[in-house]
Amino acid sequence: MSIQVRIPTILRSHTGGAKVVEGSGDTLDALLSDLDNRHAGLRARLVTADGNLHRFVNVYVNDEDVRFLGALDAKVSDGDTVTILPAVAGGAFGFAAVAALRRPVAG
Amino acid sequence: MLRIDRSFIDAIVAHARRDHPDEACGVVAGAAGSDTPLRHIPMDNAARSMTFYEFDSMQQLRVWRDMEDRGEEPVVIYHSHTATEAYPSRTDISFAGEPDAHYLLVSTRRPDTEEIRSFRIVDGVVTEEPVEITAVVDPHAVQSYMFGQSPTEVDYECSGR
């Protein structure tokens, strides 16, 4: 048993084109570190330098947005499916103002 | 180039006008690899803002899974700018995460002018492309899937207005 991770088009350069990869770990943080061992650079596309989940992606454990589950501290276990989607957002406003408007990312 | 049926442009512009002065956003899905928009999915702007739009993350998960089950992909991702030109902002470029999608922008700054432009946004590089709007061949070929939207106003010919 392991955790299935669904990879969006924009990140498949890190997985050799694979749509689904498998990994293990007790938390999302541990899972992403495990994945990075085989899919170099993937973690850095999802986690910022200061250790938070990037605002450009949405990550779900099964049917829940991990922002509501403790972000990188979200618990995962064998048999779970983790889905990564690019956040669809934008608008006429400047980026700094947008960052201030967005809900804070927990964790 | 984006080839898109007139009925989708009409539906997208109507959505943008309806939500003005807030920004409106949505997707037109089509069969994966076909580059043909076939199913209009208006999305809620979770930010409900005049200068920012954001898909609700849970709604997006449902819509993206639904597309996957149908063998579809987001052929067009659209949003409106309500006071400025239909050109991607730095924010739009930062977020653009679907390299295969046509990013369609609508400006509603002028009530009587239809202002639509389409772009590819790949690795932070914006490339404008021509939009070919095709005539409505079969009005029933176009399915519009309303998702969490307030009901559209239907003006039947017999309403007497």
Image (cartoon, grey):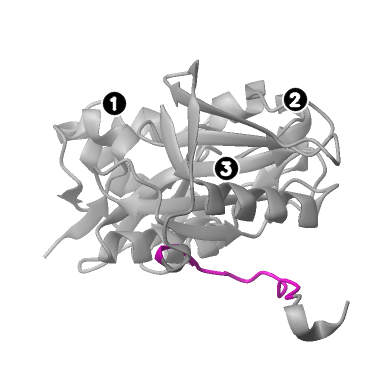
Residue A74: % across, % down: 44, 58
Other residues around mark 2 within 10 Å, as few (<14) / some (14–19) / many (≥20): some
- Kind of residue at badge 2: Glu
**Left or right, A78 with reference to B28:** left
| Residue drawn at point x = 82 percent, y = 49 percent | B20
Question: Residue under mark 3: which chain is it in?
Answer: B
Question: Residue under mark 1: which chain is it in?
Answer: A
Separation of residues labelled 3 and 1 (CA atoms): 30 Å
Q: Mark 1 vs mark 2: same chain?
A: no
Q: Secondary structure at mark 3?
A: strand
Would you name the residue on which mark 2 appears? B85
Residue A96: % across, % down: 74, 26
Q: Is residue A88 visible?
A: no
Separation of residues labelled 1 and 2 (CA atoms): 36 Å
Question: Residue under mark 2: which chain is it in?
Answer: B
**Left or right, A105 with reference to B130:** right
- Kind of residue at badge 1: Gly
Q: Quadrant of residue B82?
A: top right
Out of B23 and B161, give the one closest to the viewer. B161
Q: Quadrant of residue B15?
A: bottom right
Residue A86 shown in magenta: no
**Which quadrant of the rendered structure holds the N terminus of chain B?**
top left
**Above or below, B127 relative to B34:** above
The residue mark sitting in front, 1 or 2, is 2
| Residue drawn at point x = 63 percent, y = 71 percent | B148
Out of A73 and B53, give the one closest to the viewer. B53
Residue A69: % across, % down: 51, 62
Asked if the residue under mark 1 is in contact with the one under mark 3, i.e. CB atoms within 8 Å, the reply is no
Would you name the residue on which mark 3 appears? B78
- Kind of residue at badge 3: Tyr
Magenta segment: B141-154
Would you name the residue on which mark 1 appears? A41
